């Protein structure tokens, strides 16, 4: 979102001095300042910090999505100033995108998660770029809504940034519309200059062990979606009747899963956790969650902040056996020499501190087991126990590797959650790298072949582009890179003109049974969920069925 200076501008230039990116001109140091009728904000450079709004004495500066009709011309007035004024950056050099040729650029974005929005945010800065965003779900924001743990509400604040992008006049929602069902890939290609797939990594990695598919063995991806109210997983069968659950993996998702399983339901009731999950957790018999890590503590995948926060969960002990905190030789040597990376050194220190904490009678437990791997899950009709092997560091390898020993033990459990990573799935009509689980690409441009030739007009961003690594910050960089590739290709004349107008898309998907939800529909859903949560002091109470979403959006029930 950019800001716009409107008619009341008094030219006192108080806004200029507080702008961290020097995007307001002319400044008092520039010759035109004394003759200019007003000041202008560069929409390409503005970073939406809001400092100028707070400083303006006459309230002349507004976010561009809050302009009244009478002030809409100032969008173009501000932008036009920078067509023939080349200004230098201040504290942070202004970022100028390529100057686009005349005419509109139509872009379809498939997916509505963070990477999709960051690409869209970059694109809609240009008024002539029209972005249509498609998602099969009736709600936007992807894993921010369905992946971020409900007790991590501050992380979800990024939704405000996404909402600002969606409020742009050159942005349109096609929620509750499934590409491949309601509109085909070929039809998108015919109607848009560029198509960006931001479909994420929709499934989990597998363990490859016997008994992995027994009842009670669940991907963490599904469990997370279940407690976050994803419509596809509202009816997931989660057995919480046993006292012990086992989580395989030790990344942040594994920590989230463990924390939710042993947190006080009364505390979770203050969050936006799905009601069906909250009800199940209130009846849960789980008092211990064991996390299995294949390698040592120095190689743990979780972040220090998430690990440390476990110690603040009321009524929960973090349990670590000090003997399992053995380090590989290289790490041990670097730690002794005080040359070890500070993040890893902190990880080791925190684990050792947890290992020294005495347990508290009656507390629930999160138990970390390092240098162990699952070997086999067994049970009659459902999982009853997990056989685990102890690992040892392998010799003579550059990368820290482990090898199984002869020592094995069993864990009695009725619930095993595998949290060893997400994985992308093939996208219809796009090439796919089965090994990496991504669409082959060069800086977001889809590759047609292994030799690097790209398919003009087709792009990817996010986890389907680079693999399931990195969070919101990485997705911002990733989305921006893909958007810049689209804009550069348009400038270079790479993109073919659409064969058909995009004006028929709404009718086309409706004819095929899509009950499309637009921006107004999503706002109605959002307001209804927040209203439902207000009385209970919750952020929102989530709808979990498509019918509920459609009703909240103002649609008539399907007859």
Image: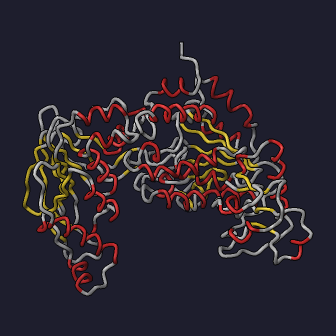
Q: How many numbered circles are shown?
A: 0
**Residue located at (61% from left, 35% from top):** 174
Q: Is residue 523 visible to the viewer in this orientation of the structure?
A: yes
| Residue 376 drawn above or below residue 277 | below
Residue sitting at x 65%, y 73%: 92
The type of colouring in the image is: secondary structure
Q: Quadrant of residue 303?
A: bottom left
Q: Is residue 76 visible?
A: no
* Outermost residue toward the front in this view: 57
Q: Position of residue 331 (x, y in %)?
A: 25, 78
Quarter of the image for residue 480 reads bottom right
Left or right: 332 in relation to 555: left
Does 115 sit above or below residue 516? below
Q: Is residue 385 above or below residue 389?
A: above
Which one is in front, 478 or 5? 5
Q: Nearer the viewer, residue 217 or 524?
A: 524
Position of residue 351 measured from the top left corner of the image (x, y, whole percent): 22, 67
Q: Nearer the viewer, residue 425 or 318?
A: 318
Q: Nearer the viewer, residue 442 or 113?
A: 113
């Amino acid at each position: 979102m950019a800001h716009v200076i409107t008619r009341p501008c008094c030219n006192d230039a108080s806004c200029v001095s507080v702008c961290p990116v020097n995007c307001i001109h002319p400044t008092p140091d520039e010759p035109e300042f004394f003759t200019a009728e007003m000041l202008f904000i560069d929409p390409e450079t503005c970073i939406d910090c809001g400092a100028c709004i707070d400083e303006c004495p006459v309230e002349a500066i507004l976010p561009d999505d809050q302009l009244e009709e009478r002030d809409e011309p100032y969008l173009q007035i501000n932008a036009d100033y920078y067509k023939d004024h080349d200004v230098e950056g201040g504290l942070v050099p202004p970022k100028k995108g390529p100057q686009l040729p005349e005419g509109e650029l139509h872009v379809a974005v498939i997916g509505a998660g963070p990477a999709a929005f960051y690409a869209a945010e970059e694109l809609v800065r240009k008024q002539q770029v029209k972005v249509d965003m498609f998602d099969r779900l009736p709600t936007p924001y992807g894993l921010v809504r369905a992946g971020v743990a409900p007790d991590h509400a501050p992380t979800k604040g990024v939704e405000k940034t996404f909402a600002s992008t969606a409020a742009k006049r050159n942005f349109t929602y096609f929620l509750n519309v499934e590409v491949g069902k309601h509109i085909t890939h070929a039809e998108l290609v015919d109607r848009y200059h560029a198509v960006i797939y931001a479909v994420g990594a929709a499934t989990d990695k597998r363990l490859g062990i016997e008994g992995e598919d027994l009842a009670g063995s669940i991907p963490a991806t599904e469990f997370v979606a279940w407690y976050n109210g994803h419509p596809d997983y509202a009816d997931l069968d989660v057995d919480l009747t046993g006292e012990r659950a086992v989580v395989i993996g030790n990344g942040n998702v594994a920590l989230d899963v463990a924390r939710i399983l042993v947190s006080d339901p009364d505390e979770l009731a203050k969050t936006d956790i799905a009601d069906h999950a909250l009800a199940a957790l209130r009846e849960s018999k789980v008092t211990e969650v064991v996390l299995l890590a294949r390698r040592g503590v120095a190689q743990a995948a979780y972040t220090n902040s998430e690990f440390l926060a476990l110690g603040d969960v009321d009524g929960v002990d973090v349990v670590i056996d000090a003997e399992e905190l053995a380090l590989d030789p290289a790490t041990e040597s670097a730690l002794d020499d005080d040359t070890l990376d500070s993040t890893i050194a902190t990880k080791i220190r925190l684990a050792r501190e947890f290992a020294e904490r005495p347990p508290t009678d009656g507390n629930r437990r999160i138990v970390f087991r390092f240098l162990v791997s699952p070997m086999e899950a067994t049970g009659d009709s459902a999982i009853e126990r997990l056989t685990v092997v102890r690992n040892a560091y392998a010799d003579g390898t550059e990368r820290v590797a482990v090898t199984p020993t002869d020592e094995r033990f069993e864990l009695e459990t009725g619930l095993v959650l595998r949290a060893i990573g997400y994985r992308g799935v093939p996208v219809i009509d796009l090439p796919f790298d089965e090994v990496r689980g991504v669409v082959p690409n060069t800086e977001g441009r889809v590759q047609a072949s292994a030799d690097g030739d790209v398919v003009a007009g087709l792009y990817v961003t996010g986890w389907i582009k680079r693999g399931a690594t990195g969070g919101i910050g990485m997705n911002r960089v990733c989305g921006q890179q893909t958007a810049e590739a689209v804009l550069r290709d348009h400038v270079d004349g790479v993109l073919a003109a659409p064969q058909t107008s995009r004006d028929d898309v709404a009718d086309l998907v409706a004819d095929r049974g899509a009950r499309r939800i637009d921006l107004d529909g999503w706002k109605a859903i959002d307001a209804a969920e927040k209203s439902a949560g207000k009385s209970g002091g919750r952020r929102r109470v989530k709808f979990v069925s498509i019918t509920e979403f459609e009703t909240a959006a103002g649609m008539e029930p399907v007859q």
